Amino acid sequence: WDNLDWGDERWIADTAALESYFTLWAQLLAQMPESEAANLSGALFRKGNDYPRMQLRLLDVAEYFWRHPNSPFRSEELFMPVLEAIAAAPGIDSLYKIRPRFQLTAARKNRPGTKAANFSYTMGNGGCGTLYGLRAEYTLLMFYNPGCPECARIEEYIPRSEVFAPLIASGRLKVLAVYPDDDVEAWRSHLSQMPAGWAVGHAPMEKGGTAVYDLPGIPALYLLGCDKTVLVKDRPLDVIEAWLVQHTDDK
């Protein structure tokens, strides 16, 4: 981007070219330490402070790459500095900052290193449970939908995993699967298909700025510590599995 002509607005219309360059950049950033890459993602957008139209166009591309649930580059750590740069950009009208500011507020919830927000859920037997009521060294919190193919893959994989299964069997790891939407009938009809030993609940999550968890996509996976500190936030299952391998193999 060093030679990018921010004043050449042909970039705004040439989606294919812009996404081609962004793909190469996203690939490079994915190979770097996340904190270093985050500095670069925000710095690019601050460079364009005199060109608000280009900033907003690049924001669209960054959102697709770093926030879209199906993007292989999805990364809240890289997207947050972009949102911060847009929120502070002097040339962008406040109207165009409403959505980025909302997204930034949502992204700041339940950050790694902070305590996960507690919530209550309804169990299949009609009883109630809470996130903090689960006692274990680790908690895998999974927001899911009954008809979600990726959720089904995870439900199948975890009981057979050489990493997850022993931790669950020993009691060190508990899984809490939560259905966050409103179709109670669909949730109840799927309960029998959930893996044995999992805590499964229904907890409708409010939509909008008051939601305690930001769920841009389903499934959403969080790994929590014994005091419910967020260790890994909304990352693919293989990332969480690798974290557990790194931090539990000596115990």
Image (cartoon, rainbow, N blue to C red):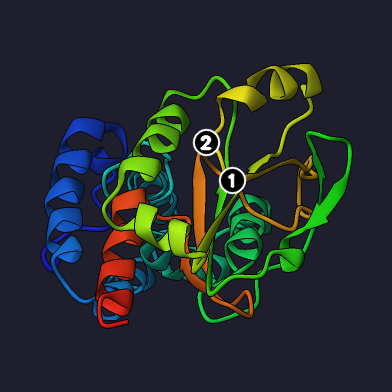
**Residue at the image point whose x is 58% and y is 56% from the top:** 100
Depth check: 182 or 201 in front?
A: 201
Depth check: 219 or 100 in front?
A: 219
The percent coordinates of residue 59 (x first, y second) are 41, 51
Quarter occupied by the N terminus = bottom left
Q: Which residue is mark 2?
A: 195
Please state if 41 lies on the left or on the right of 97 as rendered.
left
The percent coordinates of residue 54 (x first, y second) are 36, 52
Badge 2 amino acid: Pro
Depth check: 40 or 8 in front?
A: 40
Instruction: List the single residue furthest toward the front.
Output: 170
Quarter occupied by the C terminus = bottom left
Q: Which residue is mark 1?
A: 198
SS for dot 1:
loop
Q: Are marks 2 and 1 in contact (CB under 8 Å)?
A: yes
User: What is the spatial separation of the Cα atoms under label 2 and label 1, in whole angstroms?
Assistant: 6 Å
**Residue at the image point whose x is 29% and y is 44% from the top:** 9
The answer, for residue 214, to whether it is visible in the render is: yes
The percent coordinates of residue 93 (x first, y second) are 62, 57
Please state if 108 lies on the left or on the right of 39 as rendered.
right
SS for dot 2:
loop
Mark carried by residue 6: none
Badge 1 amino acid: Trp
Please state if 198 lies on the left or on the right of 251 as rendered.
right
The answer, for residue 91, to whether it is visible in the render is: no
Residue 102 position by quadrant? bottom right
Residue 228 position by quadrant? bottom right
**Residue at the image point whose x is 46% and y is 57% from the top:** 168
**Residue at the image point whose x is 26% and y is 44% from the top:** 72
Up-down relation of residue 89 to residue 190 (above or below):
below
